[in-house]
Image (cartoon, rainbow, N blue to C red):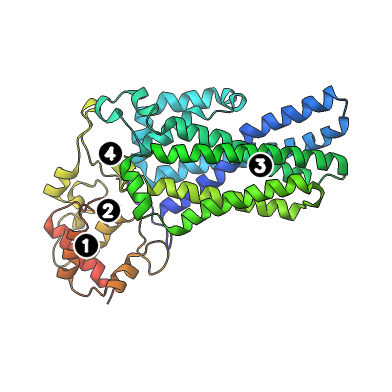
Amino acid sequence: MYPIWEVPNLTAGIILAVIATFHILPSHLSTSAMWFNVYIETKAYKEDKPELLEFIRKYSLLLLVFAYVTGSLSGIGIWYAATVANPRGISGLIHNYVWGWATEWVFFIIEVTGILMVVIVGILAFMLSPGKWIETGNFFDGFFNKTYWSQLLVRTTLMFAIAAVYAIAAAARLKNEEVRKFIIKTASKWGLAGLLLGGTAFFWYLKTIPAAGQELIQTFAPQGLKTGIIASFVLLLFYFIYANLKPLTIRLVTAVLAIAVLFAGIWSTERMREIIRKPYVISQYMYSNQIIGNDIASKNVTSETNLINQKGILAVSPFVPEPLRVVNDANMIEAGKLIARIECLSCHTLDKSGLRPMPQMVERRGFTDAEEMKVFLEGLDGYAYMPPFMGKKKKKNALANYLVSLNR
């Protein structure tokens, strides 16, 4: 593991999630909006309606600045955040899909014109359901996995809903009422079609999720995320219907609110996708704390769990200060904190507030005794949502003492 990226009150994963959720808007917009522009521009020339070109100019400027500039910058942000948050996870993906990513970078124009995010979806779906790759290590066994086609269809169809939301926002600023009415009504139809097709595909996607993921949705997924997905879908559905019936009443502020609802829906969906992958970053291969949990014989990869359980996490992690490699009474608390950072920080914070704060968990359960805490930690082994604790008894004792110290 590399030096740990600790984000106060949040987690590195949440920072990555915010950037990635934002990135979906410009990246998906750049693909689907091009086709909307082609349709409007073709109509303008075929029917001799040059007034429609005013919309094309405004929408193209939006695409140029928002999709291609901020989209590119947020894409770089994803790579940076993912690399510092989970370097071993990114390393595992690059080693398996370096040529896939190279294909996307070189032939990105084909993806834009073909409206299919065929490469990146394969990699994202692989992280959830690697399929036969676990046994074979074959590129295509992992790429065309169980959730690939359903997720590809969801993203492809929902792209048109994203394009429609932004098209309405661009059209809301047009002065020509006839053009504004035509664009908003047309965009609302595209949005309705994309939303309904995407919603149908989403049910198919849910059925393709592995059984472990299905169980996590039922047991651990926050109700707020489920509500966010449903509420955003319903609100956008009514928004498109209303825009089609009353196009001239749509104002820029209304369109901006629709974009906010769209973002909330994407956030809820992406967070749900992260949850159903737990406790792994790459399912059945690497835990969210970057520890390799299973043998992948075809790739000559060996599970690290036995080694860590024999020697301890501080002994095998490369960037641990030498005075902390061996736990003793003098460094017990400091060593325990480092263990918490290595094994727990990918999902928890060590602050008293924020996302899944460990001090709050200790305080809520009233732990004041290290032995009690050790029993609790042992009870978490096999817990579906978390990686098992890895390390020798002395390391677990150090972690227990550190956690109890948070409640003193």
Q: Secondary structure at mark 3?
A: helix
Disc number at residue 399?
1
Q: First in sequence, mark 3 or 2: give its number.
A: 3
Structural distance between the alpha carbons of marks 1 and 4: 26 Å
Residue 66's label in the rendered image is 3
Dot 2: what SS? Answer: helix
Q: Are marks 1 and 2 in contact (CB under 8 Å)?
A: yes
Pick whichever of labels 3 and 4 is earlier in the sequence: 3
N-term-proximal mark, 1 vs 2: 2
Q: Are marks 1 and 4 in contact (CB under 8 Å)?
A: no
In the picture, which quadrant includes the N terminus?
A: top left
Q: Residue at x 27, y 53 (%)?
A: 343
Instruction: Residue 74: give x, y in percent of width and height.
Output: 55, 43
| Number of residues whose C-alpha sits closer than 10 Å to that of mark 3, classed few (under 14), some (14–19) or many (20 or more) | some
Residue drawn at point x = 80 percent, y = 52 percent:
249
Q: Quadrant of residue 10?
A: bottom left
Residue 39 % position (x, y) = 73, 28
Q: Amino acid at mark 2?
A: Glu
Q: Where's residue 308, x and y in %?
A: 17, 47
Q: Quadrant of the C terminus?
A: bottom left
Give the Cα distance between marks 3 and 4: 37 Å
Q: Which residue is mark 4?
A: 284
Up-down relation of residue 357 to residue 174 (above or below)? below
